[in-house]
Amino acid sequence: MSMPGTTAWFAAHELRLTWRETFAMLTGGKPERLRKVAAGVLIFIAVMHVVAYFAVGRLADAGLDHDLRTLIAVMAGVLLSGTAVLSQAMESVTRTFYTRSDLELILSSPVQAHRLFAVRIAAIALGVSAMALLFLGPFINVLAWLGGVRWLGAYGVIVAVALTATALAVALTVAMFQTIGPKRTRLIAQIAAAVIGGLFVIGLQIAALFSTGTMSRLAFLQSDTMVALAPAMDSILWWPARGALGDVSAMLAVVASSVVLFVLTTALYAPRFAQFVLAASSVSRGHEVAGRARAFRVATTGGTLRRKERVLIMRDPWLISQSLMQLLYLLPPALMLWHSFGSAGGAEIVLVPVLIMSAGQLAGALGWLAICGEDAPDLVMTAPVAPGQLLRAKIEAVMQCIGVVFLPFVIAIAALSPNAAAIAACGIAASAGSATAIQFWFRSQAKRNQFRRRHTSSRIATLSEAFVSIAWAGTGALAVAGNPIGIVTGVIAVGIVLTVRSFAPATR
Amino acid sequence: MDRHSPPALDVRGLRKSFDARAAVAGLDLQVRAGEFYMLLGPNGAGKTTTLRMVSGLLQPDQGAISIFGVDARLDQVGAKRIVGWVSDEPMIYDKLTPSEYLAFVAGLWGVEQTVAEARARELTDLLGLGKVAHARCESFSKGMRQKVALAGALVHEPRLIILDEPLTGLDAGSARLVKNVLTERVRAGATVIMTTHILEIAERMADRIGVIAGGRLIAQGTLGELRARIGSGDTPLEELFLAIVEKDSAAA
C-alpha cells in the first residue's frame, strides 16, 4: 500500500474509481450482467476484425519501400485518429475542470493537489489510448497477420498519438482558460471538442469535392494535386506514417517525442490545475446576473411545453455543439449541392441518404433530451396535463427542430429533382420518426446533463437507432436511383422498428 | 369553513411497497380544508411516499385518495389541477429564468396570461426574487432555487399545497419568508400539508399534527390533543414525538 498523498496513492485511488465507474457503466449497475458484457465486447472485437479484414486486408503488403501516395494515405489515417482522440481528450480535460465531485475535498485537504492532477492527465491519456486501441487494434492485428509483425509498430504510433493529443488538449484548454476566461471556455471547448472530431474528415471531403468533383477522400488523397503538395519523402513529417508501416526507428522516435511532450505538458500545467478548477467553480457558483427582461408569455399547454423544449435546447452549449456537429457533417453535401446545381446529375443519390441519416441521428439526440432528459420531472408529472399530451408536445418540439434544420436542404434538392426532394422529405420524416419512437419506447427518466451517457441506458435503443437510420438512408439512396431493392431496405427498416418495439420495456 | 364541505385530503387504506417492503401500509389520513397540517415521522416512515402518491407522482398499490372530493386515482388531471407540490430537492430548469419558469408553470396549469403575469410578479417580489427574475437559475443557491420552486407551486393558486421538507438547507431569512408565505396562504383559505424534521416549526405553525411510522398514522391531533394523550400541558413537541414513536415501536 503506498503512502497517502503520493502520486502512486492517487493513481490507485483513480484506478479504483475508474474501474468501478466503467464497470457500472458497462453493466448498468448489475454485476450479474458482467458475463454478457464480456461476451458482447469479445463479439464486438471479433466483428471489428472481420470489418478490418475486408477494409484494409489488401493493404497489408504495402512495403517499407513505400511511395508518397502510401505515406499520404497512412498519414491521413494517423491524422484522422489524431483528431478523434484530440476531441475526446479535450472533452475529458474540460470535464476535469468543471466537474467538482471530489475536487473540493481534495483541494481542501493538506495534500499536494498537483499530484492528483498529474494522475488525472495521465488517466485521460490512458482512457483515450484505450478507446483508440479498441477501435484501431483490430485493423493493426489484421495487417500484422497478413503482412507481418512490422505492422505492430502502429500500436506505438497510436499511443504516441494519444499522448500528443492529450498534451495538446491540456495546452489548448488552458490557453482558452487564460485568454477567454473560464465561463466562455466551457462553451467553446465543448463546441471545439465536437467540431475537431469531424473537422479532418469533413475538410478532406470538401477538398475532394473541389479537386475531384466527388466526395471520395481516397481519390483526393491519391490525386496528383495532393502528391505535388506533399512534403518530400525524407521529411520527418512522415515519421508517424513510416512508424505505422513498420519502420521501428521512426516509430520509436515518434513515441519518444510524444512522451517528452506529454511529460513536459503535465509538469507545466498540473501545478496550475487547482487554480483553474477554482476559477471554473466560480463560474458555476458565481453570483446570479440580472438578465434582460423578456415578455411574460403564457401559451396553451402544448405551446408552453414546446417552447420550453425549444428554449432549453437553444440554451444548452453541449447540445448546440452536438447539433453543430450534425450540421457540420451536412456541409459537404450542401457544398456538393451547390457544386452540382443545375449541371451535374446524380448528386442527390449522395445527398439524400446523408440527410436521412443525419436526421435520424439528430432526432435521436433531441428525442432523448425532450422525452428522457427532464430536469423537473416532479413539476411536469404533477401538472394537470394528460401524459399523452405531454409526450405529444415534446415529440412535436423535436420534429419542429428537425424541420427547421432539414427543410432548406429539401427545398434546395427540389430545385435539382422534385422526385428526390420528395424521397428525402419522406426519408427524413421516417428516419427522425423512427429514432424518436425508439427513444419513446426505451425512455427512462434522467437529467439533461446525463446526455453524454444516454447511449449506456439501453444498448438495444442505441444500436437500433443507428441501424434504422442507416436502413432508411439506404432506402432513400436506392429510391432516388430508382432501384427496386429500395423496397427491401425499406421493409428492413420497418422490420427493425417493429422488432425493437417488441423489446421495449412492457410497463410504461 | 362549511362543515359539509369535503376534506382537503381524504386518504383511505393507502398501500405502497417497494421490492416487497411496505413503505406505506394501510394509511388512513384526513386533512381538513383550510388547515396547516404537519406530517412528522422518523426517516423512512413513509411520509414522502405518501405525499408523492397524493401528488400523483407515484401510483399506489391499493387505497383511495380524494382531494376536495376529487378521486385522485380516477380523475388524475382534475386532482392535479388543485394541488401544488414542492419537494425538498428543488427541481427547476437551470436554463430558464424565474420569470420564464413561472410562465411555463402557468401554461401547464392553464392560468390566463394577465392573471399569471400579475401573480408571478407578486410572488417574485414576495419571495425576494424580483431582482433576479430575469437571470437564469443555473447560478442560484439552493435557497433561491427552493423559492423559485415554491413560487411555481403557488402561481396557479392551488387549494392544496403539499411541501416535503421545504425548509431543508434554507437560511434563517429564507426560511422565515417561506413560512410567512405559507401562513398567508392558509389565512387566505388554502390548505397546507408539510413534512419537516424541525419540530419547533411544527409546534409553532401547525393547526394539527400527524405522526407516521412504519407506513401508518400512529397519532394525530392538535398540539394540545397530543399533549393530553401523552405528556403534560407544557411538554415540548420533540418529547411528545419521541414518546409517540417509541411507544409505537415498543407495541410493534
Image: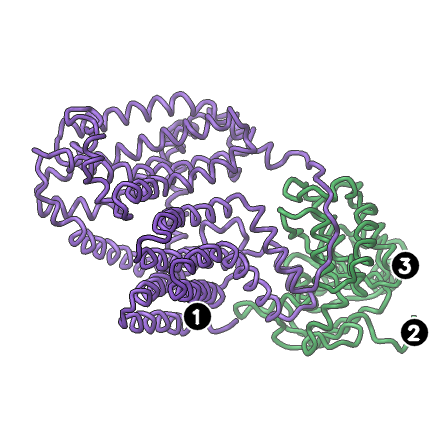
Chain colours: A purple, B green
Disc 1 marks a residue whose amino acid type is Ala
Q: Which mark is residue B187?
A: 3
Marks 2 and 3 sit apart, C-alpha to C-alpha, by: 15 Å
Which quadrant of the rendered structure holds the N terminus of chain B?
A: bottom right
Which quadrant of the rendered structure holds the C terminus of chain B?
A: bottom right
Residue placed at 23% from the left, 25% from the top? A256
Disc 2 marks a residue whose amino acid type is Asp
Depth check, front residue: A162 or A180: A180
Residue placed at 79% from the left, 47% from the top? B124
Residue B4: x %, y % from top left: 89, 78
Depth check, front residue: A170 or A494: A494
**In the rendered image, which residue does mark 2 sit on?**
B2
Residue A31: x %, y % from top left: 38, 57
Q: Can residue A9 be seen at all in this image of the molecule?
A: no
Specify few, some or many for label 3: CA neighbours under 10 Å numbering under 14, 14-19, or 20 or more.
few
**In the rendered image, which residue does mark 1 sit on?**
A504
